[in-house]
Amino acid sequence: MPGSTRELFDAFPDPSPALVPIGPAQLDRVDDALHYGWAWHRHHYAFRKGDRIRILDAGCGTGLSTLGLARLNPGAAVVGVDASPVSLGLARQRAEAVRVAGLEFVEHDLDTPLPPALGTFDFVVARGLLGTADDPSPILATLARALDPRGLLLATFPSAAGRMPARQLVRALDAIVPAGAAVADRAEAGLDLLGSLRPDHPIRRFDASRHGPNGPNLEAFVATYLNDRETDWTLEAALGAVEASGLRCLYVADRGAWRPDRVFGPAIPGRLRDLVAGLDEPDLARLKDALDITIHPDSYTLYACPAAYEPPTPAWPEDLGPDALDRLVPHATGLATPFHVVADPSADRGRATYRTANGALGELEARSDRALRLVDGVRTVGTIEVEIGEGAEPEPPEARRTRWLDLANLGFVILEAPDPRQNVDCIHLGRVEDRLDCACPRRWVRGCEVHGHCTIATVGPADPKSAAYGQALGRIGISSTIACDHCADYSPEG
Ligand SMILES: C[S@@+](CC[C@H](N)C(=O)[O-])C[C@H]1O[C@@H](n2cnc3c(N)ncnc32)[C@H](O)[C@@H]1O
C-alpha cells in the first residue's frame, strides 16, 4: 500500500465515526449488499458448509462492513484486515461497542500474501479496497490465494461512468480553491459549492442518491469526492483484473433486473433478441454497462470464484403452481441478530419472544418458532412444514402462508424470489406488503433512502415468473405500482 494511501486513511478512516457513530446504532447501518450475494451463492452453488464459514473483510477500514458480515452470518468467523492502524483501532472500538461475536482484526498490507496461519476463506469481501491501489494485481493475487477452492469473492471497483458527476464537482473545486489547500479546507469549500448548486443540477442529484436530501457532512464529502488516491475503472478493466488473478467472474451485480425495454425499442429484430438472450453473465453485464449507463451508479460489484470451480447454474422451476410455497427455500438472513430468546415469561403459553436486528421485540407462536429453527437455507418450506407438522393438527394452506409471511415481516427470513439477487430485504420497517408498495428500483439494495423505507423487489407484471412468485405468496399483491411515490427521480419506465 503506498504511503500516501495509508496517510489518507489514517487521517480520514473510512467509514468515519462522524458518519456512522460508534455504538449500538451502527448496527442499523449494516449494508445488506454484503450478504445477499453470499446468500445467492450459498443457495444456488450448492455450497453447503454449515454456519462455521470463514469470511475475510479485506480493507475493512473502521470495521463497519466487518461488523455487518459477522452479524449477517451468525456463527461465521470473520477476519477484518487493513493496513491502516488508525482504522483498525476504530474497528476494534466498533466491535467492542456492540459485542458482536466471531470477529478478529489483523493489521496487514494486502499487497503482500496473508500470513498462512490465517488460512483460507469461504467468502472474501474487498469493498472499497481496490480503487485506491496503483496496481490492484498484487492485492487480487493475495485475495485469490486466500479463497477456498469453492469460495466466493465480492470486489468493488469505482465506476468511471457512474462517478462522472463527482469528478466534475472536484474539477470545479480545483478551479476555485488554491492549489495545495489542505483536504479539510477543500472539503469546506466543496460543501459550500455543492450546497449552492440548483437542486436539480446533475451533481446535486448524484449526491442525493448517495447522501439523501440533506447532503454529506465533512467526512462523507471527503470520502465521496476528495479521495484522490482513487482511480476510476471501466467494467472491462475490472473484469480483466479479476480474471488475470486466476478467478472466474460469475456476475456483475447491478441495481435492478435486466429490462431490455430500458434500452431497446419494440422493433428489435429476432436475431438480435436471440443473441442478447444467449449472453452469459459477464457479456450481459458488458452490454448493460454499455447501453444503460445509469445501471452502475457508483461502483462495479463483481462476484468471482476460483477459475477451476464450476458452480452449478442457478435453476428456478418454470411451473410455479399453487404449491410453489412448498418449494421455496427460506434462509436465515441474519438480519435479525442470532435468534436471541429474551427471558420469556410467555414461553409457557406456547409463544417465544425474539429481538430483531433493529432492537424491536417480536413474538412468535410456537409453530412459527419451530419453523424458524429449521430454516437453514437448505430445507424447503415444504420439508420444514412436514417436520413441524408431525403430530400436530393439519392446517389450512392460508395459515401456512400467513405464518411464512409473518416470519418474513419479522425480518428473520427472506422468502426466496426467482432470482434472489433481485429481492433483498433490508431493515425491518413496515410489513412486507408496505415495503413492496414502496420498493424503488433505483435504490435496489439499499432501499429508498428518501423516505427511509426498505426492501427492494424487482417484481412486476413484466416478469411472469416474479408475478407467479408473488401470487404464490398470496398476500404480496404484485401490481404494476412498485415505484416509490416519494422518489421524484423515479419513473416507472426509467
Ligand atoms: C474505502 S475503505 C473501505 C472500508 C470497508 N471495506 C467498507 O466497505 O466500509 C478502504 C480501506 O482499504 C484499506 N487499504 C487500501 N489498500 C490496502 C492494502 N494494500 N492493504 C490493506 N488495506 C488497504 C484502507 O486502509 C482503507 O481502510
Image (cartoon, rainbow, N blue to C red):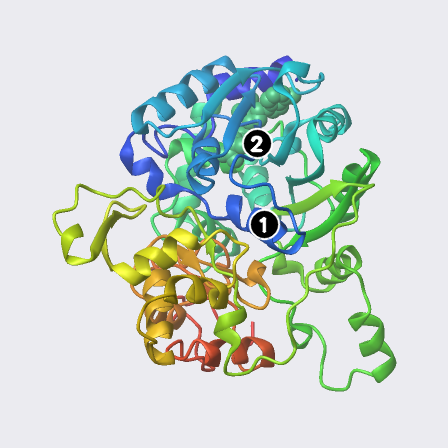
Q: Position of residue 468 (x, y in %)?
A: 53, 80
Q: Position of residue 60 (x, y in %)?
A: 52, 27
Label 2 CA crowd tier, 10 Å (few <14, some 14–19, many 20+): many
Label 2: which residue?
A: 54
- The amino acid type of the residue labelled 2 equals Arg
Looking at this view, is 172 or 50 the one in front? 50
List the single residue furthest toward the right.
271
Q: Position of residue 189 (x, y in %)?
A: 43, 33
Looking at this view, is 190 or 107 the one in front? 107
In the visual, does 306 lie left or right of 122?
Answer: right
Q: Would you place residue 468 above or below residue 96 in this image?
A: below
Label 1: which residue?
A: 37
- The amino acid type of the residue labelled 1 equals Gly
Callout 1 secondary element: helix
Q: Is residue 15 visible?
A: yes
Q: Quadrant of the C terminus?
A: bottom right
Q: Looking at the rendering, which quadrant does residue 139 occupy?
A: top right
For ligand 1, the image quadrant comes to top right
